[in-house]
Image: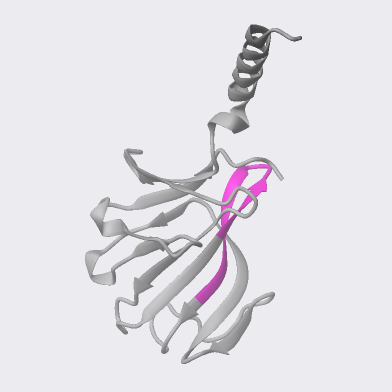
């Protein structure tokens, strides 16, 4: 018969080793800070297999919805944001009218979407209250950015495992 105390000691030893591993302590997260000052604002969980989030806002001139879809990819420079899709309605300032080389512009519902792969590093936004700019996570939770800061906000992926 084995000693129960020995099993407890083994379990504690294994747990100590497991918790000391970097991946056990840190989760893949989207970290938001004020761009110039670096003041911490918020951490949001990301899927460690495919770090992604959307930025949704109201177009400042047209008053129509815009959604920018981002994924973070590990590169030699670190984790970098890639704009992979932009959905929008109407035509106007700052909205694409044609696709560039390697991009595709197509109809999407009552609007359009641009499919692309553009590195945005650093990813910085100015959350003007009138635009209702917000982060939308894949589980559809939304976070209004103007409630965090009225200054430019930098977003970066941290603690994500290397692919």
Look at the image and name its color scheme.
one colour
Question: In the image, 150: left or right of 42?
Answer: left
Query: What main secondary structure does the magenta stretch of the protein show?
Result: strand
Q: Residue 144 location, x and y as percent?
A: 30, 60
Q: Nearer the viewer, residue 6 or 32?
A: 6
Question: In the image, 101: left or right of 97?
Answer: right
Q: Residue 39 location, x and y as percent?
A: 32, 38
Q: Residue 126 location, x and y as percent?
A: 32, 59
Q: Nearer the viewer, residue 12 or 117?
A: 12
Question: In the image, 136: left or right of 126?
Answer: right
Asked whether residue 34 is in view, the answer is yes
Rendered-image quadrant of the C terminus: top right
How many badges with numbers are in the image? 0
Query: Is residue 111 shown above or below 163?
Result: below
Quadrant of residue 22 in the image? Answer: top right
Quadrant of residue 67 in the image? Answer: bottom left
Q: In this picture, which residue range is highlighted in magenta? A: 71-86
Q: Which residue: 51% across, 62% down? A: 138
């Amino acid at each position: 018969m084995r000693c129960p105390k020995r099993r407890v000691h083994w379990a504690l030893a294994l747990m100590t080793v497991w918790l000391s591993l970097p991946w056990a302590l840190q989760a893949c997260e989207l970290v938001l800070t004020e761009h110039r000052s670096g003041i911490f604002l918020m951490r949001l969980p990301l899927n460690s297999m495919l770090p992604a989030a959307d930025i949704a806002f109201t177009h400042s001139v047209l008053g129509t919805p815009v959604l920018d879809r981002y994924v973070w990819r590990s590169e030699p420079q670190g984790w970098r944001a890639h704009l992979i899709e932009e959905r929008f309605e109407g035509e106007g300032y700052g909205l694409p009218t044609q696709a560039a080389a390697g991009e595709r512009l197509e109809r999407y519902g009552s609007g359009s979407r641009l499919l692309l792969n553009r590195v945005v590093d650093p990813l910085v936004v100015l959350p003007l209250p009138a635009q209702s700019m917000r982060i939308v996570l894949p589980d559809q939770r939304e976070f209004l950015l103007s409630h965090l800061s009225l200054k430019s906000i930098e977003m970066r992926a941290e603690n994500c495992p290397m692919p």
